[in-house]
Amino acid sequence: MKIAIASEGKTVTGHFGHCESFNIFEAEDGKVVSSTNIANPGHKPGFLPSFLNELGVNVIIAGGMGGRAVELFNEKGIEVVLGVTGTAEQAANDYLQGKLQPGGSICHEHMHKDSCHG
């Protein structure tokens, strides 16, 4: 299983499309076995869901995300977990342990970075 977390450094970002990078955690038997950081190749409508799908991602975690991106991830069979804060590593571990407490934040405005928090 691969878990991608939209991040600013090691912290979950407020809006997935404008993140600095994706921390990608590979897990086996409920534990992280490897991690890598991939720079965000750019926020273009519809691109990032396909990009992450091609990397074999099964789950995307972010603070918030636009509704269309959620739809595109769902179409690709990628689970979307929103409303998450804290460190990417902790979010991945909490997800694997069934402890992640998502807040569910669909963004409606894309004018300002991190404007969809809450």
Image: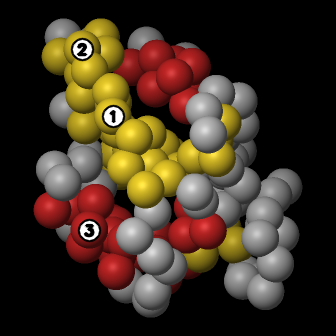
Crowd class of label 2 (few under 14; some 14 to 19; many from 20; radius 10 Å): few
Which is more N-terminal, label 3 or label 2?
2
User: x and y percent of residue 59 in the render?
Assistant: 34, 45
User: Up-down: is 50 above or below 63?
Assistant: below
- Disc 1 residue type? Thr
Crowd class of label 3 (few under 14; some 14 to 19; many from 20; radius 10 Å): few
Residue appearing at x 70%, y 72% in the figure: 107
* Quarter of image, res 9: top right
User: x and y percent of residue 18 in the render?
Assistant: 61, 68
State the count of labels: 3
Residue appearing at x 77%, y 70% in the figure: 113
- Disc 2 residue type? Val
Q: Quadrant of the C terminus?
A: bottom right
Crowd class of label 1 (few under 14; some 14 to 19; many from 20; radius 10 Å): few
Residue appearing at x 55%, y 69% in the figure: 17
Going by the image, does 54 lie left or right of 85? left
Q: Which residue is mark 1?
A: 36
Visible residue check, residue 104: no
Cα–Cα gap, marks 3 and 1:
15 Å
User: x and y percent of residue 8 in the render?
Assistant: 64, 47
Q: Which residue is mark 3?
A: 51
Residue appearing at x 59%, y 59% in the figure: 19
Cα–Cα gap, marks 2 and 1:
11 Å
